[in-house]
Image: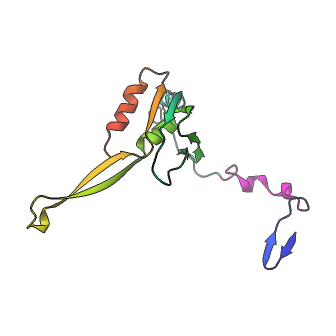
Amino acid sequence: MAIAGNRKHVDAVTENISQADPLSLSEIGKQGGIDPVSENDFAPDLEKFMHEVLTIIAHDDNQEGALDVLSPRVNGVAQPIIRGVHQKVKRKYVEVLARSRSTKYNQRQTDAGDPASLLMVPNSKMSCPFTVIHDPNPKGRAWLEGILREKM
């Protein structure tokens, strides 16, 4: 190990990192309790549905500071999506995009003489607008429309 000032650097060439206990680096071996799973808790059809591959296009965002690459995450796994390009993406990441919304509020006052008449009117829109180009499942359109109709 090389030491520079107060900092300790690890040199992968001189240190034998492979000697570390592999069980200490992963979830394996860190057993908690076992949760019972009933037939109703596990939905293999839903799991299969959420892993279907769709073709989408994430629309360009002309706002300053907008990212060219989106990174929706499901269970800690990110799926890079480049704006303006047709891409194949699993449905579970499309759900993240569909649920990603931002809300801004507009103030309206119905009576200029009454401060209590101030209304905060929400205006929600999708954070990352996209279009589904191809969905292999005939139920996919209704599924997506249901998510988009949900209130935040």
The reply to whether residue 151 is visible in this rendering is yes
Please state if 10 lies on the left or on the right of 118 as rendered.
right
Q: Is residue 25 magenta?
A: yes
Please state if 76 lies on the left or on the right of 8 as rendered.
left
**Exactly how many numbered labels are in the figure?**
0
**Which image quarter holds the N terminus?**
bottom right
Residue positioned most to the right: 14
Q: Residue at x 43, y 26 (%)?
A: 140
Asked which colour scheme the image uses, the reply is rainbow
Please state if 1 lies on the left or on the right of 122 as rendered.
right
Residue 29, percent from left and from top: 70, 51
Up-down relation of residue 84 to residue 3 (above or below): above
Q: Residue at x 46, y 38 (%)?
A: 95
Up-down relation of residue 115 to residue 107 (above or below): below
Please state if 29 lies on the left or on the right of 147 as rendered.
right
State the extent of the magenta-drawn residues as a range.
14-30
Residue 101, percent from left and from top: 39, 47
The reply to whether residue 91 is visible in this rendering is no
Q: Residue at x 48, y 26 (%)?
A: 133
Residue 147, percent from left and from top: 37, 37
Give the quarter of the image for residue 142: top left
Residue positioned most to the bottom: 5
Q: Residue at x 81, y 69 (%)?
A: 9
Up-down relation of residue 49 to residue 80 (above or below): above
Q: Is residue 88 magenta?
A: no
Up-down relation of residue 108 to residue 68 (above or below): below
Q: Depth check: give the residue in front, 90 or 118.
A: 118
Q: Depth check: give the residue in front, 145 or 106.
A: 106
Residue 55, percent from left and from top: 53, 28
Q: Depth check: give the residue in front, 23 or 7.
A: 7
